[in-house]
Image (tube, rainbow, N blue to C red):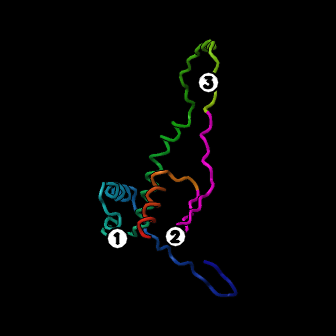
Amino acid sequence: MHIMDGQRVTKPQDTRRRHTDAFKQALVDRSLVPGASVAAIAQDAGINANLLFNWRRLHLQSLALPVADAARGPVLLPVTVVEPAPASPTPPASPPAPAARVSAGSIEISIRGTVVRIRGSVDEASLRTVLRALAGTA
């Protein structure tokens, strides 16, 4: 009860529903079954699906805590000391030579009023095919 300016204000009663731990655990267990619908389970129980998702999250976090605490402890790994291998008498191989660069030039051929411009590298067989095609059209 709170009195303010001569008026009496009453505190509304807490309308929050309280659920037992056994009820929560039973619903969480049902929802963790593969293929179970959390929304359908919540609807059958008369609760909001978000509330059941929250209970599931808290349950899964409580299961993960002991595993996480155990994982944070020190871990000893086996170590083996090996003598270094003696240096080899042969010198290391030299790096491979860079590939030959192809010239980026151009060729311009004028045949019977037709101009053919070739830029970059073109193999001989392709060039012959183009020239034969031009000779056949004239």
For the N terminus, which image quadrant? bottom right
Q: Secondary structure at mark 1?
A: loop
For the C terminus, which image quadrant? bottom left
User: Which residue in the structure is indicated by mark 1?
Assistant: 46
Q: Quadrant of residue 11?
A: bottom right
Q: Decide: is 135 above or below 82.
A: below
Identify the residue at image location x=58%, y=15%: 82
Q: Residues within 10 Å of mark 3 (few under 14, many from 20)?
A: few
Measured as percent of width and height from the top left, residue 88 is found at 61, 14
Q: Decide: is 70 above or below 34.
A: above
> Three-letter amino acid code at disc 2?
Arg
Q: Residues within 10 Å of mark 1 (few under 14, many from 20)?
A: few
Chain-order first, disc 2 or disc 3:
3
Measured as percent of width and height from the top left, residue 46 is found at 34, 70
Chain-order first, disc 3 or disc 1:
1
**Which numbered circle lies on residue 93?**
3
Look at the image and give the residue range highlighted in magenta: 97-119
Find the distance from the CA under tag 2 to the CA under tag 3: 56 Å
The answer to whether residue 35 is left or right of residue 110 is left
The answer to whether residue 58 is left or right of residue 87 is left
Chain-order first, disc 1 or disc 2:
1
Find the distance from the CA under tag 1 to the CA under tag 2: 90 Å
User: Which residue in the structure is indicated by mark 2?
Assistant: 112
> Three-letter amino acid code at disc 3?
Ala
Q: Secondary structure at mark 3?
A: loop
